[in-house]
């Protein structure tokens, strides 16, 4: 017994001594260093999973926000068959019928004449959030403001939450300056989370220009957006491309109105390389020098924003056109006229 | 019909559930709801009422549906597996009464869980100064009817398949029926007459669980209360549906060798 | 008034199997038990005892034949009202106490109010579980659970007790207490029909036994007669005495000493008297008694 213990101790001591004497092992093949430029979510599974969760949360909040704007009435796009059959889509009354945002949508709970379910359908229309939505109005977007805070907290990379949230903060005619400042604070946080993001930069400039009419403060943000966006145009998402297009337009308009015609044309020409069909940019490049008011140019702006942005910031269009008035209270819930 | 026996069986299910601490899960969930409410409060209450009500309704509905399915689908198969069924069915009660008693017990357990969750949620909602409207009471009542329907379906499925399969199918039925209904209402006009007939049959057979969810009306403002005839019709629908599923359960169980 | 407490006619119980076709567990079994009898239902594992009991309780439907309890169709609510049943492996709701368990079964039995409360306490005291009636079942030992099971079977003064492996899990003291309790129950007019592998218990309790194997009735015996049959007497003697009219079972190894075996005591006494008359010598007297187990093994082996 003693002998075997002594043998074991000797063996381990020899091994330890040998271990101390040998040189540290060097890898014959160097392991690849951490690939630079990878985000945490690309290199760590846990971060990726968490990121996906946050993205899902913010996407869900986005959908709920849209739902609350419709006071709980769920809408869906018309099917091809329904379109061919000429099934009437719901319309929004927010902009006196000019606004076409919901015109392709119908309510998920069908109307009585389109429901084969008989009394079960009647019960669902009585228990679910169902209304004939033709010519309907929306709830005040400001009522959804905390949700934008929530969704950008859940996913700081959710750019649409920052930009649309800023628009919602600006909602209403009262206390414009204060609201705009709050919107800029909000966007500043968004920019900190998403440095050099084209959409946020363009929105930042947009708030300065549209809400505060401070072109001098707006133009650096539009230019920054153009600088970033033009460098990596192919990597921009459709939304970012749209923001870049807006940035180009505003940059061109502000310069033009400020009398910087040549500069304006140069920017417009650069913009046309990316947006060949843009009427605003094309007109600045092609049209003879003539005094054009800001208003004329704004009139050319094509409304290409997605459906939600149309819902959320109709006042931007209102202001631009001046012929629409918006007198509703900030938090008022509109009735849905049948 | 031996109602005393049914009541006694239900009492056994409830007591066993309470002792087994099944409802502790509810308490933990309730605590999580309160915690979530305080987190949401961080973002400001103003304007979040609809969201909070919607979220609370969804969470309470989801958890109570899970409890309903898990409770009801375990009732008979576990009794057979654990051999606790023999002393029961050796008593002078018929198998319909046995099923009815078990189902009633599961329904009451689910209702207790749901009401506890509702109470805790109401407590959480007071943080948001959410006003309670009559439609919320209607929401609770209708949800209770819906949960009873879910219990009856789970019980039926548990007699037709394994517990695991019954739970899975119950979830599919509870959460998937509305999707099927939506798909049917969307595609009905463009479907062939044969498919339309199938849709009509499916519509009659599938449990219309969504009918019992007044959550979207309760969460959003200005909808007002649901007419009483609608509540009455829902109650009648629930009674008919539960009776039908109970009858089917009995048809399967009454001659089943144990 | 039905003649039999329990009766089956050509009873067949068949189980469906996913593979290999149906399994015939009970095959044309015809048995009967008279009121007031204690009958042991014996057979090896898989003989069909539990299936027969399940058919009597209505847990399985006979594929052929019929079973009756006091003239009522077995499995009917009315017949079950007359029966107290103890399942083979008794399991009770683990989170209920014995009191709550019996209260539940008592209510199902149709008892209520003060009568119910008095009876459940009385039964639990009878089976010796008074000290633990407020403990949850999951904390009770197997033997204590068996006592709870026996107590629930006795609820409502049943006319027929059907007990499947009644002594399972009980210690010797518990068995004796149970035996006394069952005999007392019989004395009150209850019929007992039980299956058991504990042949000693059967021997001490039963008036009659039914032996089945592979679903068939092999033999039914009155236990008093059987016990007598299992007894054997032997005399070892010297001298020339003619005992051939009393027994043919006479052997000798050395042609001086003879071994004669008799089935009854009277034959033995007559043999001793003759040996003395013939001036022979009685060398030894032996009384042997075979066990029920020997009978069981032998009979089942013979049937196989």
Image: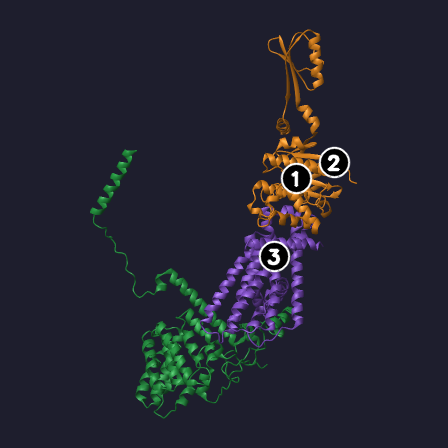
Chain colours: A green, B purple, C orange
**Residue A192 on image: x %, y %:** 35, 73
Q: Chain of mark 2?
A: C
Q: Residues within 10 Å of mark 2 (few under 14, many from 20)?
A: some
Residue B117 image-quadrant placement: bottom right
> Which mark is drawn over residue C34?
2
Q: Nearer the viewer, residue C250 or B195?
A: C250
Q: Chain of mark 3?
A: B
Q: Secondary structure at mark 2?
A: loop
Asked if both marks, 1 and 2, belong to the same chain, the answer given is yes
Residue A285 image-quadrant placement: bottom left
Q: CA distance from mark 1 to mark 3?
A: 31 Å
Going from the N terminus, do you reach mark 1 or mark 2 first?
2
Picture residue at 38% right of the left edge, 75% below the top:
A240
Direction from residue A31 to residue B205 in the image, left or right? right
**Residue A266 on image: x %, y %:** 31, 84
**Residue B36 on image: x %, y %:** 48, 66
Identify the residue at the far right of this view: C1
> Which mark is drawn over residue B106?
3
Q: Secondary structure at mark 3?
A: helix
Q: Label 1: which residue?
A: C163
Q: CA distance from mark 1 to mark 2?
A: 16 Å
Identify the residue at the far front of this view: C131
Q: Secondary structure at mark 1?
A: strand
């Amino acid at each position: 017994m003693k002998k075997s213990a002594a043998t074991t101790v000797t063996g381990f001591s020899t091994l330890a001594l040998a271990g101390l004497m040998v040189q540290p092992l060097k890898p014959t093949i160097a392991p690849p260093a951490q690939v630079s430029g990878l985000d945490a979510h690309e290199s760590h599974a846990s971060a990726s999973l968490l990121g996906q969760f946050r993205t899902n949360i913010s996407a869900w909040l986005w959908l709920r926000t849209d739902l609350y704007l419709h006071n709980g009435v769920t809408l869906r796009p018309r099917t091809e068959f329904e379109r061919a059959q000429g099934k009437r889509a719901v319309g929004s009354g927010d902009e006196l019928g000019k606004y076409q945002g919901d015109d392709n949508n119908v309510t998920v709970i069908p109307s009585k004449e389109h429901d084969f379910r008989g009394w079960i359908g009647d019960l669902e229309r009585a228990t679910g959030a169902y209304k004939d939505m033709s010519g309907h109005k929306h709830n005040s977007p400001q009522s959804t403001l905390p949700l934008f805070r929530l969704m950008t907290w859940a996913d700081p990379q959710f750019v649409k939450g920052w930009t649309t949230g800023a628009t919602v903060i600006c909602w209403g005619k009262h206390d414009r300056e204060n609201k705009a400042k709050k919107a800029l604070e909000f966007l500043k946080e968004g920019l900190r989370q998403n440095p050099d993001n084209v959409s946020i930069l363009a929105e930042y400039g947009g708030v300065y220009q549209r809400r505060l009419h401070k072109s001098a403060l707006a133009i650096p943000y539009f230019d920054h957006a153009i600088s970033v966006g033009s460098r990596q145009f192919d990597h921009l998402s459709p939304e970012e491309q749209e923001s870049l297009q807006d940035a180009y337009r505003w940059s061109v308009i502000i310069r033009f109105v400020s009398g910087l015609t040549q500069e304006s044309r140069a920017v417009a020409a650069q913009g046309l390389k990316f947006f060949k069909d843009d009427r605003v940019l094309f007109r600045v490049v092609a049209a003879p020098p003539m005094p054009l008011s800001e208003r004329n140019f704004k009139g050319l702006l094509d409304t290409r924003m997605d459906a939600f942005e149309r819902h959320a910031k109709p006042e931007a269009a209102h202001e631009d056109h001046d012929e629409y008035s918006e007198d509703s209270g900030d938090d008022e819930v509109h009735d849905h006229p049948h | 019909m031996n109602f005393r026996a049914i009541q006694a069986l239900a009492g056994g299910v409830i007591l066993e559930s309470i002792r087994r601490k099944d409802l502790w899960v509810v308490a933990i969930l309730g605590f999580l709801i309160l915690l979530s409410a305080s987190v949401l409060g961080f973002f400001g209450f103003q304007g979040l009422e609809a969201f909070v009500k919607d979220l609370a309704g969804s969470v309470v509905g989801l958890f109570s549906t899970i409890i309903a399915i898990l409770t009801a689908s375990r009732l008979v198969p576990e009794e057979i597996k654990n051999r606790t069924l023999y002393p029961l069915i050796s008593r002078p009660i018929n198998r319909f009464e046995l099923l009815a008693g078990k189902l009633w017990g599961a329904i009451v357990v689910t209702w207790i869980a749901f009401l506890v969750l509702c109470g805790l949620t109401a407590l959480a909602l007071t943080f948001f100064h959410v006003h309670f409207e009559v439609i919320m009471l209607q929401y609770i009542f209708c949800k209770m009817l819906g949960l009873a329907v879910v219990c009856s379906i789970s019980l039926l499925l548990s007699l037709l398949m394994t517990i695991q399969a019954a739970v899975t199918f119950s979830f599919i039925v509870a959460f998937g029926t509305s999707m099927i209904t939506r798909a049917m209402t969307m595609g009905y006009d463009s479907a062939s007459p044969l498919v339309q007939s199938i849709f009509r049959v499916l519509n009659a057979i599938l449990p219309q669980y969504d009918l019992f969810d007044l959550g979207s009306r309760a969460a959003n403002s200005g909808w007002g209360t649901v007419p009483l005839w609608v509540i009455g019709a829902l109650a009648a629908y629930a009674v008919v549906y539960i009776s039908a599923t109970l009858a089917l359960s009995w048809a399967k169980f009454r001659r089943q060798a144990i | 008034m039905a003649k039999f407490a329990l009766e089956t006619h050509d009873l067949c119980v068949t189980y469906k199997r996913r593979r290999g076709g149906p399994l015939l567990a009970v095959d044309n079994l015809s048995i009967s038990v008279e009121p007031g009898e204690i009958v042991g239902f014996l057979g090896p594992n898989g003989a069909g005892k539990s299936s027969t009991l399940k058919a009597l309780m209505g847990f399985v439907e006979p594929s052929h034949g019929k079973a009756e309890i006091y003239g009522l169709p077995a499995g009917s609510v009315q017949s079950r009202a007359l029966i107290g049943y103890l399942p083979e492996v008794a399991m009770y709701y683990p989170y209920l106490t014995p009191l709550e368990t019996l209260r539940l079964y008592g209510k199902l039995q149709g008892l209520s109010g003060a009568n119910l409360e008095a009876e459940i306490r009385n039964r639990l005291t009878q089976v010796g579980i008074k000290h633990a009636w407020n403990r949850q079942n999951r904390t009770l030992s197997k033997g204590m659970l068996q006592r709870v099971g026996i107590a629930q079977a006795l609820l409502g003064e049943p006319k027929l007790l059907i007990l499947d492996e009644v002594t399972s899990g009980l210690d010797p003291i518990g068995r004796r207490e149970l035996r006394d309790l069952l005999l007392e129950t019989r004395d009150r007019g209850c019929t007992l029909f039980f299956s058991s592998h504990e042949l000693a218990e059967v021997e001490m309790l039963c008036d009659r036994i039914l032996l089945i194997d592979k679903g068939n009735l092999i033999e039914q015996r009155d236990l008093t007669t059987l016990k007598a049959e299992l007894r054997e007497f032997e005399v070892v003697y010297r001298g020339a005495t003619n005992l051939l009219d009393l027994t043919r079972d006479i052997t000798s190894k050395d042609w001086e000493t003879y071994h004669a075996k008799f089935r009854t005591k009277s034959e033995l006494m007559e043999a001793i008297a003759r040996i003395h008359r013939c001036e022979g010598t009685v060398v030894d007297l032996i009384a042997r008694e075979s066990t029920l187990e020997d009978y069981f093994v032998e009979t089942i082996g013979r049937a196989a």
